[in-house]
Image: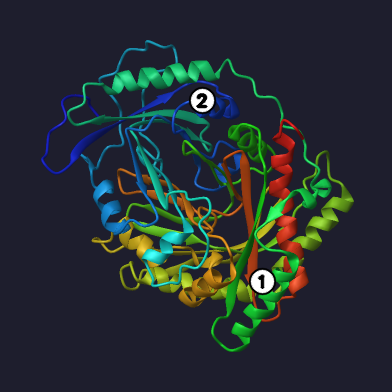
């Protein structure tokens, strides 16, 4: 892509994308640490699990523009459509050399090659809260929104650093914007300086957590155990009455937090590296997500969604092959593989996602491209499946959200009635939890996670929410124990990075 004056238009700000591969060695946590010092930073990934997820990690900060939609405002999708169409590519065939920047002024290497397919090359990074679903379907509004975060928050980044975990290469990305005096080379120079500064940073290994020593008497919850157990019985009554087949029911935990948010992100990336991990600096709040679940990925007119239903613990072998650990992991793997309950849960969600994808895809292109599969993650085994299709040419990201959001794996089936029951039974708004976090590229690509294993930090407090799928044969006390087990992993990380721990 050659540099030069960008054409003007009355309707859009036209952009060119400049991509520059650099030869350097950077410690990924150090790069995250440096970007966390910048205004409105967003980090996607930065850990080894990205290689098996969507391959790339991204670091961006100091956005050109921030879009927020808040509770009480109207027409979120109209406003979203307008802001997403504000910036347009001058040429959609943007993935190529920046041939005018021939000088090697930094010693980091010459630009060469083309940006890999699927790499985010500038645009919007942010989140969509679960309660955005109330603007898609007519749903009750009885939960308390005590955190009062925006329902949508997206930052437009005109420069970022990308890392290709497969090739082990770094890329500098710069957008040249219509009417802007700052050149792509100037933006590259800023990014290169951040790279150099990152190389001087050393991040010590985070302190190991003791999951079993979490004192729940010091943890506040939005419901007590008796309420939780009664609600599971109530949900099962709805299932027996034929109103739903499955409900994803959750509870929220709250504790004090006195550390930097990036420290918790380092901890999660070290001990629980997740393929769709995210760090979002929202100014007066931070989001730290260790999500392993992809909501949607959009590339070249095709869409994929990959729901998770079914989890078992996986023990990490620290040295050699411990026969006892190996046997435990094998037993847990097989237990999940042959669980009829877990199989039925995922099959219901596959059908739900097939129906959602069919609303926006060309007839005959929707298919299950990956049937139920047990995948190994750093600390767990998950049962997953993938549903895909070719999008109709007129479909926009707003159409996709209205057809599919929120994800079926964290609502239930049927989706609308499940969401009604969730609103009836959960006392506080979910917010980012079970919403989606990720990017929407200026080229029309997108990758959004499901906001599980996600912690909100605001007002020197941390909020973590966990839940599970409730079906007809669910045992209320077992479901309670599962949410506590999931919470321990999140709360242990919080406790480990606390200054007063």
Q: Which image quarter is the C terminus in?
A: top right
Residue found at x 40% / y 56%: 71
Q: Which image quarter is the N terminus in?
A: top left
* N-term-proximal mark, 2 vs 1: 2
Residue found at x 65% / y 24%: 203
Where on the picture, by quarter, is residue 107?
top left
Q: Position of residue 269 (x, y in %)?
A: 63, 38
Is residue 326 depicted above or below 169 in this figure? below
Residue under label 1? 342
Residue found at x 72% / y 29%: 205
Q: Is residue 427 visible?
A: yes
Q: Is residue 43 left or right of residue 462?
A: left
Residue under label 2? 37
Label 1 neighbour load within 10 Å: few <14, some 14-19, many 20+: some
Q: Position of residue 81 (x, y in %)?
A: 27, 53
Residue found at x 74% / y 51%: 488
Q: Where is residue 487 in the image (x, y as percent from the top left)?
A: 70, 53
Q: What element carries label 2?
A: loop
Q: In this view, does 126 lie to the left or right of 76?
A: right
Q: Is residue 297 left or right of residue 481?
A: left
Q: Is mark 1 on a helix, strand or loop?
A: helix
Label 2 neighbour load within 10 Å: few <14, some 14-19, many 20+: few
Q: Position of residue 142 (x, y in %)?
A: 50, 68
């Amino acid at each position: 892509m050659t540099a030069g004056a960008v054409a003007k238009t009355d309707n859009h700000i036209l952009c060119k994308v400049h991509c520059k591969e650099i030869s350097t060695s950077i410690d990924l946590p150090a790069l995250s640490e440096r970007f966390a010092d910048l205004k409105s930073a967003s980090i996607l990934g930065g850990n080894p699990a990205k290689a098996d997820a969507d391959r790339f990690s991204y670091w961006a900060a100091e956005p050109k523009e921030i879009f927020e939609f808040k509770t009480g405002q109207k027409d979120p999708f109209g406003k979203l459509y307008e802001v997403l169409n504000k910036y347009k590519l001058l040429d959609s065939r943007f993935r190529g050399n920046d041939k005018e920047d021939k000088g090697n002024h930094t010693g980091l290497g010459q630009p060469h090659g083309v940006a890999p397919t699927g790499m985010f090359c500038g645009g919007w990074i942010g989140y969509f809260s679960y309660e955005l679903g109330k603007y898609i379907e007519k749903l009750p509004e009885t939960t308390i929104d005590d955190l009062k975060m925006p329902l949508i928050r997206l930052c437009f980044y005109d420069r970022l650093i990308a890392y290709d975990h497969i090739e082990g290469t770094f890329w500098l990305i710069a957008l040249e914007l219509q009417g802007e005096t700052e050149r792509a080379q100037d933006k590259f120079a800023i990014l290169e300086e951040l790279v150099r500064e990152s190389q001087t940073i050393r991040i010590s290994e985070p302190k190991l957590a003791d999951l079993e020593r979490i004192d729940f008497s010091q943890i506040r919850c939005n419901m007590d155990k008796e309420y939780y157990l009664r609600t599971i019985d109530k949900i099962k009554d709805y299932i027996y009455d034929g109103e739903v087949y499955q409900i994803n029911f959750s509870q929220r935990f709250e504790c004090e937090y006195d550390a930097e948010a990036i420290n918790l992100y380092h901890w999660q990336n070290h001990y629980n590296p997740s393929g769709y991990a995210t760090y979002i600096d929202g100014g007066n709040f931070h989001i730290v997500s260790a999500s392993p679940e992809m909501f949607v990925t959009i590339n070249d007119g095709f869409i994929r969604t990959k729901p998770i239903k079914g989890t078992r613990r996986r023990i990490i072998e620290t040295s050699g092959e411990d026969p006892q650990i190996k046997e435990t992991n094998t037993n847990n793997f097989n237990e999940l593989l042959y669980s009829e309950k877990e199989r039925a849960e995922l099959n219901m969600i596959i059908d739900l996602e097939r129906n959602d994808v069919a609303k926006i895809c060309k007839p005959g292109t929707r298919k299950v491209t990956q049937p139920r599969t047990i995948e190994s993650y750093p600390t767990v085994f998950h049962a997953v499946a993938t549903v895909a299709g070719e999008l109709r040419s007129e479909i926009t990201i707003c159409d996709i959200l209205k057809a599919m959001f929120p994800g079926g794996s964290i609502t239930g089936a049927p989706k609308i009635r499940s969401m009604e029951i969730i609103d009836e039974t959960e006392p506080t708004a979910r917010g980012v939890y079970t919403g989606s976090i990720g990017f929407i590229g200026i080229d029309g690509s997108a990758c959004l996670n499901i906001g599980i294993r996600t912690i909100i930090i605001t007002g020197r407090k941390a909020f973590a929410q966990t839940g599970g799928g409730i079906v007809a044969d669910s045992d209320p006390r077992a479901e309670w124990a599962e949410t506590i087990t999931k919470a321990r992993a999140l709360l242990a990380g919080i406790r480990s990075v606390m200054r007063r721990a």
